[in-house]
Image (cartoon, rainbow, N blue to C red):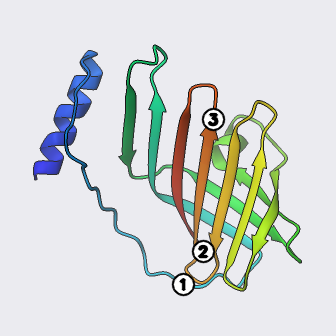
Amino acid sequence: MKILIALLIFFAGAATGYALSLSKTIALSFALRNPSPINRTELACKSAAQASLFRTIDRKAVEADAGPGTDEVAIKIDRPGSQISVMTRAGLRVGFTEADQYPIVFSTTDTLLAAKVEELGALNAFLVKTDAGQVMWTKVAHGLLSSQAVLLECY
């Protein structure tokens, strides 16, 4: 209950333009479905949770948020270990027709790591845990000094 109250105060302050300073770490927990191994190369994934951290435009503060995720992603793993292709539902909605390609830079029997630095210097990385059916998608952008992490559950 304390976490809910703290979050309500935080978001109310943010909505009114007041900055709040929290002196303690707030732990949030989101339920995950039972992990199941991925034995396929084409995955449909839904975001279970997301978190963001970014410096404000005036560079005087850092803002953070976390919550249930909303992303839906299709991932195709091209074997033997060359790249993954990623297409988001949001991308499809705005008219993108081709998936983004990310080279696989590390691979074991139950883990793939694919990453790419984009044209404007943003880093996207996908850590695929095939033994758990989960993917951690991280995005880091240098322009606003921001990062985002999304935990995807795939089926």
The reply, left or right, for residue 17 in relation to residue 3 is: right
Q: In this view, does 65 lie above or below 67?
A: above
What crowding class fits label 1: few (fewer than 14 Cα within 10 Å), some (14-19), or many (20 or more)? some
Q: Which of 112 and 25 is in front in this view?
A: 25
Q: Would residue 87 be found to the left or right of residue 3 on screen?
A: right
Q: Are marks 1 and 2 in contact (CB under 8 Å)?
A: yes
First along the sequence among labels 1 and 2 = 1
Measured as percent of width and height from the top left, residue 107 is found at 76, 75
Disc with the residue nearer the chain's start (3 vs 1): 1
Query: Is residue 114 rendered to the left or right of residue 72?
Result: right
**Residue at screen point 76% across, 70% down:** 106
* Picture coordinates of residue 133, whole percent (x, y): 58, 76
Q: Mark 3 points at which residue?
A: 141
* Residue 61 image point, x, y percent: 38, 23
Give the CA separation, mark 2 to mark 3.
29 Å
- The quarter of the picture where residue 86 lies is bottom right
Write the residue at 77% across / 75% down: 41
The label nearer to you, 1 versus 2, is 1
- Tell me the element at label 1: loop
Residue 29, picture quadrant:
bottom left
In percent of the image, x 24 and y 18: which residue is there? 18
Mark identifier at residue 155 = 2
Three-letter code for the amino acid on which mark 3 is drawn:
Ala
Camera-side residue of 6 and 69: 6
Q: Residue at x 44, y 81 (%)?
A: 34
Q: Which of marks 2 and 3 is in front?
A: 3
Inter-mark Cα distance, 1 to 2: 8 Å
**Callout 2: helix, strand or loop?**
loop
Numbered badge on residue 36: 1
* Residue 141 % position (x, y): 63, 35
Q: Earlier in the sequence, mark 2 or mark 3?
A: 3
- CA–CA distance in space, label 3 to label 1: 32 Å
